[in-house]
Image (cartoon, grey):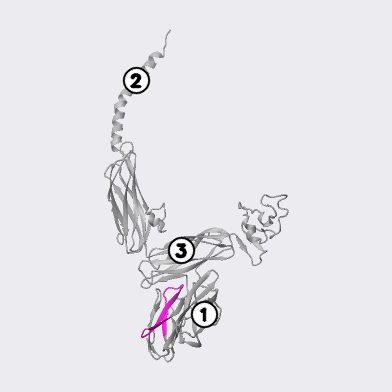
Amino acid sequence: MLEPFAPLTGVVVRLNRKVFLLLVPILLVSIVFLGANTPQVHAVTGNWIIAAQPTQQCITLGLCRAGSPAVTFPSGQGGASLVQMNVTGGFTGTITLSTVVTPSTGLTVACNPSSVAIGPANGASTCSYTSTAPAAYSVVITGTNGTASGTHSVTVPVTVVSFTLGVAPSTTSFNSGTQGAATVTLVNSGINETVALSASSVPASGLTVDFADFVIGATTATAINGTTPVASTITIAAVHGFTGAVALSDTVPQGLTCSAISPASITTAGTATLSCSSVKRQAFSVPITGTSGVLTRTVIAAFNFTIGAEYNIVATSPAAVNAGISASSTITVSAVNGFTGVVVLDDTVPAGLTCGAITPATITGSGSATVSCSAATGGNTFTLGIRGNATRLIHVAPAFFTVNGAPTVALNAKIATSASSAVRFSSSSPNVYNVTITGTPPTGPTFSINTIVNVQGYTISPSPNSFTSYPCLCHVGCGRYSDFFHGSHPWNTGSRERHDCCNRKLASDWWHDESCCWRSCPGYR
């Protein structure tokens, strides 16, 4: 039987074999050529990657964040990055590190070691940064090995700040409808600094944050020991727009007899007096405490009783002014027990305040002098320390200068290494808020720090039988267990009766805690 298609099929088969035999050499040459000229083919040459992260110390101090290459450090202290070079695809070689800094001046970078052998194990180097010029820098760290694996780089944002901020406590908790407070501390790196404060929160609504505060001062009172009282002047000055009432109290030591502080409360700003006497020839210290809501400030009022000649010194605090406007304080020296000596006056000027000379610079016996000061940047209350020196008889009196404006904190590096401000929180919306407090200097980078504010859900009203809670919501007060549960409830044991305020569930997924009844219903036992 004839098979007409067989010869054709055979031809096709023979042709395919010929084509295949012709293509095999071409394919082999092509593979060799491509393998020699295609970079980063892992199966042939391998590869490697580079990454950078801040040190654990920087993260612990709150200057850096885990998962971000950015490094922040105070001027003059230095920082570092841990540079990791990881092997992929079986790469083996030596990586040489180099750096490029933008801007080109102000920051010094040194990587140690500068050459790292990797493969089969990974390798690492530490790149250290030093600077005394606060600014934002960009550091590109590049690794090369001169082979087909190429060159790899990582960019590290480096921020050199002239100050840092701290906040304590790190978490503030208070009941809804009340207030909480923390302390923000500015620490500088040897530079006189005036830093503007601002705050934001997440969620953005429901929490009010301000930096309102007050300062308190008291003068030294000197008298002949006996029954004649002598008065110390207590001064309250508002800070950052404070407008509250400050209640004053004292702790009188044994041997000193004092009348009540008058007035007992000061609203926003003002003065009060504390008059004391003693038959003993000695010095007494009386702690004076000012309290306004969550804010408490303390100062020492000194009372010196002597039989020799002495003097007293006081200074007035002028009314608040705007930035750039001068205000004056009057300094008064009063002779005690026939004092006729010469009192030399000088002052300690805080950062952010500019003062002229005290006029006159000396007072003989009794008299007065003035000093005028101004601030270029508002938003702060400055404490000017006035000192009188009369042949080893040294007394100090404060004068407070308030300058209107957005909240700031000022620090004189020659006097102190830190300065602080209160931060207040108020809310009627229970939630957990993440608050970011930012300090902005006149020039240079800003610095931010986070704090947690936990607004709890229940408040107790003055009446013990009137209770509002969240999530412990009392719909019917502290009535006895009634119709919400029918029959016996596992919480009801013996003679204990479950109160209705604990048997409610909110629209949310939060169940009431049994302690709700213990807090809200004093009769629940």
Secondary structure, mark 3, is: strand
Q: Which residue is mark 2?
A: 15
Residue 270 tag number: 1
Q: Quadrant of the N terminus?
A: top left
Do we see residue 9 in this rendering?
yes
Do we see residue 214 in this rendering?
no
| Range covered by the magenta-colored residues | 370-396
Q: Which residue is mark 3?
A: 167
Instruction: Give residue 428's quadrant in the image.
Output: bottom right
Cβ–Cβ under 8 Å for marks 3 and 1: no
The answer to whether residue 165 is above or below residue 377 is above
Q: Characterize the local packing of mark 2: few (<14), some (14-19) or many (20 or more) Cα atoms within 10 angstroms.
A: few
Instruction: Give residue 128's quadrant in the image.
Output: bottom left
Query: Measured from the top left, where is residue 459 in percent x and y?
Result: 61, 63
Magenta highlight on residue 244: no
- Residue type, numbered disc 2: Leu
